[in-house]
Amino acid sequence: MNGAAPGCTTAALDSRLPDAAPAPARAVPGGRGLSVAGAATAMFLVGTLAPVSDLIKEFPVYGGQALRYAAGAAVLFVVCMVMRLPFVRLTLRELGLLVALTTLGLVLFSVSIVEAARYGGATLVGTLLGATPLMLALASGRRPSPRLLLGASAVGAGTVVATGLGTGGPIALAWAVTTLICEVSFSLLAVTLLPKLGPIRTSAYATALAVPMFLIIGWVAHGTAMMRMPTVSEVLGFGYISILVTVFAFLLWYSALQRLGTGKAGLFAGLIPIGTMITAMVVGLGMPTIGEWGGAVLVVAGIVIGLKAQESPAEDAGTRPPRVPATASSLSADSRR
């Protein structure tokens, strides 16, 4: 796994609409500059996860994930209370989407990364994730413009250059492909829920639902050894991952996804390896290679090309907000990788 910073454009970020959800790939107009900055920040923060995870590498992995999402969910529900966002009852279809989002986008995504690394394919995962922008552009539900496809392809190529091709056998490749599917699902499954729940509640419900799932997996895999008292450095690591990578990045990403649409927001997935590269340099884990810098330049160029893509007439129609019946209840607002 995974727009505007919370509080900057509070009223614009979320509207509760009737249960009928709009087409998944539709973008909501307005706040483009903040949405671009939010998407870039969110994916950069996700990229910092790998270097910071060095602080918690000795902690049982699935128990650690349960702690991470429990802390993140607690913060998000506090934000809901402060913002006076009421609990939203979901239909069976929407509940199914939420369960699928959590299972694929959070839980299976984490499991697949762990398993791919176990079979020697950690770099291979990073390489395949470079296909995320192109897959999101193709899965947007409409024919993407040639410029958007060119930009997404450039971002993917830049990711491959920055991470390398990676190694690993068939099992590692299978887990890497699973990771890619889960990463794409994290966005595609969310866009149907965002109009009704908004970024905060979508993030809060998904992270809370992930906690029991990780506890079950941890218990099956490690029994009571899945959890122990964390050290001071592990508390700091979990704090960073829970607040910045989970809460803040989730809110920024889902806000940007709602406003930019899956195609253009997906371009910023290419910033994940750049976030990893720069964070590793800052914490003293080594300077980036020429290939990594070259890949970063190609990623940025692809994002610029893709963002300048002109919307097709069908996409223009899709960016208009769905019409709310006159009998609908009054709208409420709230202020999400």
Image (spheres, helix red, strand yellow):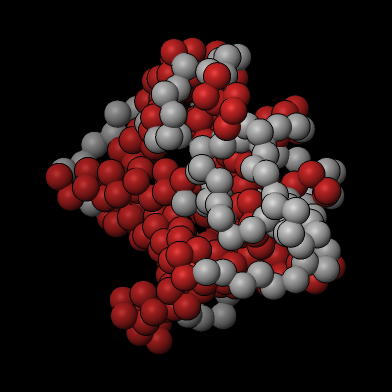
Towards the viewer: 182 or 93: 93
Task: Residue at 29% x, 34% y: name it.
Answer: 166
Residue 296, given in percent of the width and then of the height, sits at 52, 21
Residue 183, given in percent of the width and then of the height, sits at 42, 46
Task: Residue at 55% x, 52% y: name it.
Answer: 21
Residue 91, given in percent of the width and then of the height, sits at 52, 69
- State which quadrant residue 5 falls in: top right
**Residue 227, above or below 287:** below
**Does the image show residue 34?**
yes
- State which quadrant residue 158 falls in: top left
Towards the viewer: 223 or 318: 318
Residue lying at the far front in this picture: please name it. Answer: 326
Towards the viewer: 105 or 201: 201
Task: Residue at 84% x, 44% y: name it.
Answer: 8
**Residue 254, above or below 298:** below
**Does the image show residue 240?**
no
**Residue 200, above or below 161:** below
Towards the viewer: 114 or 193: 193
Lateral position of residue 69 relative to residue 240, left or right: left
How many labels, in total?
Answer: 0
Residue lying at the far bottom in this picture: please name it. Answer: 224
Residue 117, given in percent of the width and then of the height, sits at 31, 51
Task: Residue at 46% x, 61% y: name it.
Answer: 97
- State which quadrant residue 256 falls in: top right
Lateral position of residue 286 relative to residue 179, left or right: right
